[in-house]
Amino acid sequence: MPLLTGFLRVVVLALLLAGGTASFAATAFAQSAPPPTTTAAQDEYLPISELPDSEKLPAAPFLVAAYIIVWVALLLYVLSLRRRLDRVEADLREARRLTSGGR
């Protein structure tokens, strides 16, 4: 049961971190100026260096969110491995106890 409680704490913390990153990204988008109306000439390709700042997508919130997702997934995987290994070790202890006590 304590392992489940710890697992739930990790999941809640991960969700809080992911939610904070999502709200950070939403705030960054909300603060940007509305896109200007486009004309036919503006529908063509423009290098990013020529775009106005209001049309550039901030990469930092997405990078942070990606790192959080990867680290949380890795942490959950390691916790899952630990839990399964604990079960196998308990089964081995039980098997040893049964085989040594039966002789």
Image (cartoon, rainbow, N blue to C red):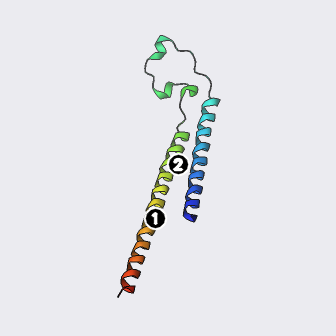
Q: Secondary structure at mark 2?
A: helix
Q: Is residue 46 left or right of residue 25?
A: left
Residue under numbered circle 2: 68
Residue 102: percent from left, percent from top? 37, 85
Q: How many marks overall? A: 2
Whether residue 89 is situated above or below residue 61 in the rendered picture: below
Q: Nearer the viewer, residue 3 or 27?
A: 3
Q: For the residues carrying marks 2 and 1, which lies nearer the camera in this image?
A: 1
How far apart marks 2 and 1 lie (CA) works out to 21 Å
Q: Is residue 66 left or right of residue 12?
A: left
Q: Residue at x 39, y 86 (%)?
A: 101
Q: Position of residue 84 (x, y in %)?
A: 43, 64
Give the structural element (helix, strand or loop) at label 1. helix
Quarter of the image that includes the N terminus: bottom right
User: What is the residue that sits farthest to the bottom in this orientation?
Assistant: 103
- Report which quarter residue 23 is drawn in: top right
For disc 1, the neighbor class at 10 Å (few under 14, some 14 to 19, many from 20) is few
Residue at x 61%, y 22% (from the top left corner): 34
| Residue 96 falls in image quadrant | bottom left
Rendering quarter of residue 86? bottom left
36 relative position to 70: left or right = right
Of 19 and 32, nearer the camera is 19
Query: Residue 22 or 5: which is nearer the viewer?
Result: 5
Q: Position of residue 44 (x, y in %)?
A: 43, 17
Residue situated in front as seen by the camera: 44 or 87: 87
- Report the residue at 46% width, 59% height from top: 80
- The type of residue carrying mark 1 is Arg
Q: Identify the residue position indicated by label 1 in the image.
A: 82
Direction top: furthest residue: 40
Disc 2 and disc 1 in contact, CB within 8 angstroms = no
In percent of the image, x 63 and y 30: which residue is there?
Answer: 30
Please determine whether, in this image, residue 35 is positioned above or below residue 70: above
